[in-house]
């Protein structure tokens, strides 16, 4: 783990960083910029890998949500043939499509889980150093508790991602490719048809393949989204800013609310993924936010852990 010193910083984004699907407004949950203070803490240098998660599962016998067969009680309106264990998988389209319907490139795949990220015909053999994916929020929490750690708050995550820099667009500065160098695993090409892999990776990459940020943390942008402990509310940053104060160690709202899906219970995602691209989703920018229903896993979502320092005696 890496020690993150804590301190006061400007959290969030502004209109100059607004971008998703080339449609303004879809990332307005990241405004306005507001002042936050976080105490110091320890953070994993990388996201949790397949090898790390396998050790946890072997020690505990834990079964992830994607490996469990859904029940009729959980989904009373579902057809029996649809009550099968699985998870959500990105599937490229055969030709360019309008970017207003993500169901064109996401599918529910029977048998997809952390051991088989893209379905039963895939596996993680030889991919021990890749991020573990297909982990829902409770799966990440279970690992963190077993490891004597926890998931970061959104404030902690963003402070750490900034790496000691102030007001920058990315975790390394204001230029996406300084000197022509790729700094993160993102999507090159026409989304969602083909990732050209110009950054060295078409799809997910092993951890720590790009330079670390100022705190020595790897992959704080791109590769896989990362779960945070906070409930998601689209208006949360606006509520913090409205206090007119520096908010100390924010823990997130008391309850979730996403206007787009009001009945879904969502937690915050941060960092973007290998599917982020300037022609669809630019949320690898450090002040941006993502969101996800807590029992939903995907093949572009993982996590890393943090730990508070031991109290002084």
Image: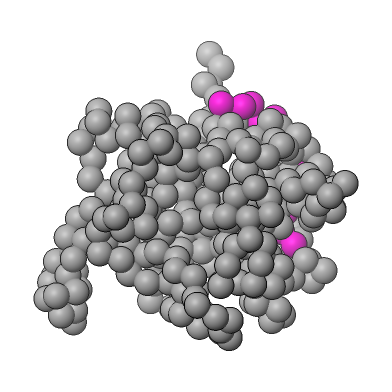
Query: Percent position (x, y) of residue 260?
Result: 50, 80
Q: Is residue 260 above or below residue 45?
A: below
Residue 5 versus residue 99 in the image, above or below: above
From the top left corner, tell me how far across and down residue 47 is, in percent.
52, 39
The number of discs equals 0
The furthest residue to the top = 313
Q: For residue 208: magenta?
A: no
At 14% from the left edge and 66% from the top edge, which residue is drawn?
71
- Please tell me whether residue 207 is drawn above or below residue 169 in the rendered image: above
The location of residue 48, given as percent across then percent down, is 46, 37
Position of residue 224 measured from the top left corner of the image (x, y, whole percent): 53, 51
Asked if residue 182 lies left or right of residue 95, the reply is: right
In the figure, is residue 246 to the left or right of 119? right
97 in relation to 29, above or below:
below
Image quadrant containing the N terminus: top right
The residue drawn where x is 36% and y is 42% is: 124
């Amino acid at each position: 783990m890496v020690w993150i010193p804590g301190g006061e910083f400007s959290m969030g984004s502004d209109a100059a960083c607004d971008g998703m699907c080339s449609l303004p407004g879809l990332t307005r949950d990241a405004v306005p910029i507001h002042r936050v203070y976080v105490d110091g803490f320890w953070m994993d240098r990388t996201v949790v890998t397949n090898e790390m998660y396998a050790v946890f599962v072997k020690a505990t016998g834990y079964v992830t949500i994607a490996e469990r067969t859904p029940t009729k009680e959980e989904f009373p309106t579902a057809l029996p043939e649809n009550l099968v264990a699985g998870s959500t998988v990105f599937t490229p389209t055969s030709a360019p499509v309008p970017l207003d319907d993500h169901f064109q490139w996401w599918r529910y795949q029977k048998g997809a889980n952390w051991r088989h990220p893209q379905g039963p015909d895939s596996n993680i053999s030889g991919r021990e150093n890749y991020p573990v994916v297909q982990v829902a929020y409770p799966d990440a929490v279970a690992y963190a508790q077993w490891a004597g750690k926890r998931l970061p708050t959104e404030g902690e995550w963003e402070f750490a991602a900034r790496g000691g820099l102030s007001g920058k667009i990315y975790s390394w500065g204001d230029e996406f490719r300084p000197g022509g160098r790729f700094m993160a695993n993102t999507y090159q090409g026409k989304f969602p048809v083909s990732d050209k892999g110009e950054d060295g990776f078409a799809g997910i990459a092993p951890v720590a393949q790009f330079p670390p940020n100022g705190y020595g943390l790897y992959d704080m942008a791109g590769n896989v989204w990362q779960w945070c402990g906070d409930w998601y509310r689209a208006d949360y940053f606006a509520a913090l800013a409205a206090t007119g104060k520096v908010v100390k160690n924010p823990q997130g709202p008391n309850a979730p609310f996403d206007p787009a899906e009001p009945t879904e219970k969502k937690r915050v995602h941060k960092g973007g993924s290998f599917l982020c691209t300037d022609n669809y989703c630019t949320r690898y920018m450090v002040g941006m936010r993502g969101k996800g229903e807590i029992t939903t896993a995907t093949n572009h979502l993982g996590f890393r852990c943090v730990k508070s320092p031991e109290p002084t005696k």
